[in-house]
Image (spheres, rainbow, N blue to C red):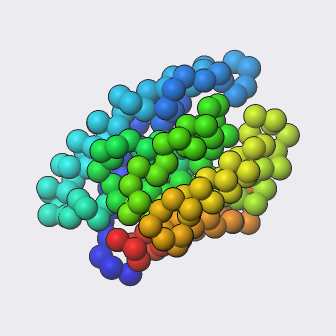
Amino acid sequence: MPPLALVLHSTGNRDDDYTPWPAPNLKKGDRPFGGGAVGYLPRLCRAKEAAEAALGADGGRSALLGYSLGGLFALWAAAQPNAPFAAFASLSGSLWYDGWREYAEEKLPQRGRDFFYLSLGEGEEHTRMARLAPVGDCTRTLCKQLQGRLETPDQCVLEWNPGGHITGIADRHERALRWLASRL
């Protein structure tokens, strides 16, 4: 695998910062999703630029990887015309999110040269929560859409993992990083 530098950037409130627009909460008693991605992306990009400067890294070979709501955010960022990343990974991405399917159909991909890594646990679409159950169909549909719109179909891959949403998280990250590093 080529040399790889990982830069982790955390957010104070993932339910706001990783969501592209406001949406109702998942469970009674939870706060609604805030839809603050448009404010979070510039902060993340400033951190990316600072890390690249400190490391002497090539910003044209960078990837944005996120898990769960972070995976939704990574794909939303890919739909922004000036997103400063060459590849995007959504691991167990919350692609069930209200309005996401329609948004992705219209906005993704922004550039035909980008790379997309999608992964999902085999059990994730078999939830009792009706709002989350479409995640498998949404992820499959997005993968087919991207494969049809990118310069070559192999620029997008969907990998299925054993288990549910919180199974094998470290292994999923490693596989995603290996795939992304081999393409950048």
- Residue at (52%, 73%) from the top-left corner? 154
Q: How many marks?
A: 0
- Residue at (63%, 60%) from the top-left corner? 144
Q: Could you say where residue 84 lies in the image, as x and y percent from the top left?
A: 29, 50
Q: Could you say where residue 55 lies in the image, as x and y percent from the top left?
A: 17, 62
**Can I make out residue 166 in this image?**
no
Image height check: is 156 above or below 10? below
- Residue at (81%, 36%) from the top-left corner? 129
Which residue is nearer to you in this view: 27 or 140? 140
Q: Quadrant of residue 168?
A: bottom right
Q: Quadrant of residue 69?
A: top right
Q: Which of the image's four quarters has the N terminus?
A: bottom left
Q: Could you say where residue 176 lies in the image, as x and y percent from the top left?
A: 51, 66
- Residue at (30%, 76%) from the top-left corner? 3
Image height check: is 160 above or below 8? below
Q: Could you say where residue 155 lies in the image, as x and y percent from the top left?
A: 48, 68
Answer with left or right where residue 59 lies relative to residue 180: left
**Can I make out residue 57 in this image?**
yes
Image height check: is 61 above or below 111? below
Answer with left or right where residue 151 lies relative to residue 46: right
In the rendered image, the residue lying farthest to the bottom is 1
Q: Which of the image's four quarters has the C terminus?
A: bottom left
Which residue is nearer to you in this view: 126 or 21? 21
Answer with left or right where residue 126 lies relative to residue 121: right
